[in-house]
Image (spheres, grey):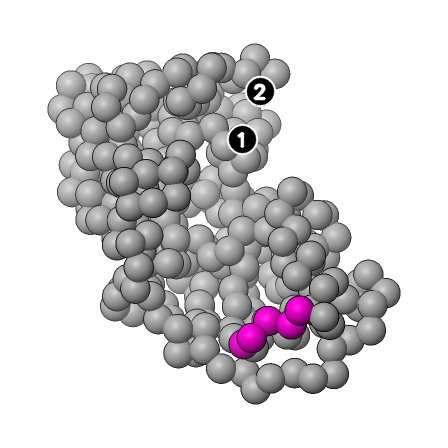
Amino acid sequence: MPGRFLLAGVGDLNRRVARRLLDGGATVTGLRRSAADPALGFEQRSVDLAIEPWPDVGAEVVIIALSAAQRDAEGYRRGYVQPVQQLGRSLQHWRTPPERVIVVGSSRVYGASDGRELTEDSPINPSDWGGDCLAEMEAAVDRLPVETTVARLSGIYGPGRDWLRRMALKADTTPPETNHWTNRIHIEDAAAALVHLAFASTLNSRYLVTDRQSAPLYQVLNYLREQQGYPTLLSVPEVAGGKRLLSDRLAATGFEWQYPTFRSGGYGTL
């Protein structure tokens, strides 16, 4: 797994990507808003990617996994849209463009919440400002003058992300109003998928990065309650709403999930 990689964003997801790449012998440079953390074991540069030129480090692959400092439309545009636009301007000055750019997006762009099945080819119809900004980011990705793909992630879970388990443990006293369809991806599977796509022989422009089984919310909550020794919820509303994401395109590339369903042990890593 040799090669030179530029990771835009050095949060939890890209740190796991970096670990996998470094274990495979790749060279990694990370770009981040904050100061470098020497403990991570790879080069990092402090860059405001929304307004500063992206440095040319001779990367063959760029993996972008950014976050917004503010949870509003302005923060999302600065956190997601403007960096991709700035990369487009910066590429004009790079000596050698990357072979491909992989950008982490979100299934939020679909906007659908009527229980339908969705693939990468399903039309997007954002229903809020966040979805609008992420759709704008995808459009900016498509305009980059290199091969690109957007990895639309569903809800990430894993160490430090235990809000669903906390919801499950108090659901007998404060139950969710709806039993809608849910989708998830363990953070280790998300990182593995990004690395897998980096080395895929061919790329499609979009991939849904989610596990292999959508599930009604109450089904997941009862599973988590059982794991903690709590009684199951007996009053379960009819399944309605949400969306069912299909990850067949990612599976067709040969990717294998460590946690293909919510019952596969991923919640034991929290």
**Mark toward the start of the polypeptide (1 vs 2):** 1
Pointers 1 and 2 in contact (CB under 8 A)? yes
Q: Amino acid at mark 1?
A: Arg
Would residue 52 be found to the left or right of residue 62 on screen?
left
| Residue 96 appearing in the image | no
As drawn, the residue found furthest toward the front would be 173
Q: Which mark is residue 50?
A: none
Q: Amino acid at mark 2?
A: Leu
- 224 up-or-down from 54: above or below: below
176 magenta-colored: yes
Residue at 38% of width from left, 38% of height from top? 70
Pinpoint residue 269: horizontal percent, then vertical percent: 72, 48
58 magenta-colored: no
Residue at 76% of width from left, 66% of height from top? 225
- 235 up-or-down from 49: above or below: below
The residue to which callout 2 is attached is 40
Residue at 62% of width from left, 64% of height from top? 261
| Residue 76 appearing in the image | yes
Q: Label 1: few (<14), some or many (≥20) within 10 Å?
A: some
Magenta stretch secondary structure, dominant: loop
Magenta region: 174-178
As drawn, the residue found furthest toward the right would be 229
Pinpoint residue 67: horizontal percent, then vertical percent: 41, 37
Pinpoint residue 96: horizontal percent, then vertical percent: 22, 21
SS class, disc 2: helix
- 73 up-or-down from 66: above or below: below
The residue to which callout 1 is attached is 15
Rendered image quadrant of residue 249: bottom left
Residue at 15% of width from left, 27% of height from top? 89
SS class, disc 1: helix
